[in-house]
Image: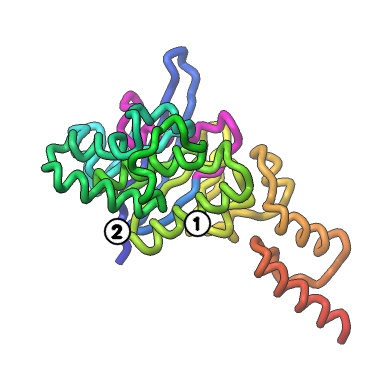
Amino acid sequence: MNTIRISVNLEAFKYPDGTVALADIRLDVQKGEFTGILGSNGSGKTTLLKIMDGLIKDYTGQVLLDGQDVRRLHPRDIYRKVGLVFQNPDDQLFAHNVFEDVAFGPRNMGFEESEVKRRVEEALAGVEMAEYGGKNIHAMSYGQKKRVCIAGLLAMGHEILLLDEPTAGLDPMGEYRMMELLTRLNRENGVTIVMATHSVDLVPIFLHRLHILSKGRVVRGGAPEEVFTAPEEMANVKLRLPHIAELIYRLKHEDRLPFGRVPLTIGEARREIVEALREKQQ
């Protein structure tokens, strides 16, 4: 039986000027799930993550963390379970070196120094930064800083990570390495992950579940292969299909090649193309 860690039943959140930023959002995050919130800039992704993390409270509706209303929980009870990684790591890092930054959370939680050291070393190893403990934060690359932010939350024992555009600002290889890291934390360490992103090409490779956010509303949700449909429907929410899916969709509908389904990854596309070529040769 699946356990729901976060349940969002949000009626509305308005900005101080009365503008409705989010409305009619219903979504559940299961234990051990890697969930994506996909939307263009300005769709409300960051605001939704802040509501899930308990940073924003003045909304109508309810957000439950392990069955408890986040607005009634003490911040300490939320932060023992949930951590939010901001889009820009410089908004989150403040200590002079990596070890001290990652150690800040566990120390604040009152752990003995020996336990703090153990947690920091384990967290840095978890994000493949074990040898960087003494390094100056300002001497690190953008991608390394993002990893240190994640380590800081892991050191506090967070079981749920909320990530705001974790691949933003990274080059293609950096994007892939970040997604590999998050996938490993999810599948090997059992960390539940909710990732806000606008990067459609990364989504189908790594995520279990996907919610598309458009103009403050969830317009579609499900497994990636259920959510990505026609290019026109994606364009309506200011997104596009993954490049692979776009190619096969057009080959199927414009060039009438006999594809059984629209694949989302290179491996799936290769199998579909080989099968389609075999059918044409028969």
Q: Secondary structure at mark 2?
A: loop
Q: Residue at x 31, y 50 (%)?
A: 123
Q: Please name the residue shown 35% across and 54% down the image.
A: 125
**For the residue labelled by badge 1, is the local secondary structure a helix, a strand or a loop?**
helix
Which quadrant holds the C terminus?
bottom right
Give the residue type that dot 2 points to: Thr
Nearer to me, 105 or 234: 105
- Tally of numbered discs: 2
* Most foreground residue, 2 or 186: 186
Q: Residue at x 35, y 38 (%)?
A: 98
Does residue 52 show up magenta in the picture?
A: yes
**What is the C-alpha distance between the residues marked 2 and 1?**
25 Å
- Left or right of 231: which side holds 167? left
Which residue in the protein does label 2 denote? 3
Amino acid carrying label 1: it is Glu
Crowd tier of the residue under label 2, counting other residues whose Cα lies within 10 Å: few below 14, some 14–19, many 20 or above? few
Residue under the point 65% across and 61% down: 264
Q: In the figure, is residue 143 to the left or right of 232?
A: left
In this view of the protein, can residue 140 be seen by the observer? yes
Q: Residue furthest top?
A: 17
Q: Does residue 6 appear to the left or right of 137 in the view shown? A: left
Q: In the image, residue 51 lies at what x, y percent? A: 36, 33
Residue wearing tag 1: 180
The magenta-colored residue range is 37-59
Quarter occupied by the N terminus: bottom left
Q: Residues within 10 Å of mark 1 (few under 14, many from 20)?
A: few
Q: Position of residue 94 (x, y in %)?
A: 35, 27
Give how far across and how far down residue 109 sits, in percent.
16, 37
Pick the front one: 258 or 196: 196
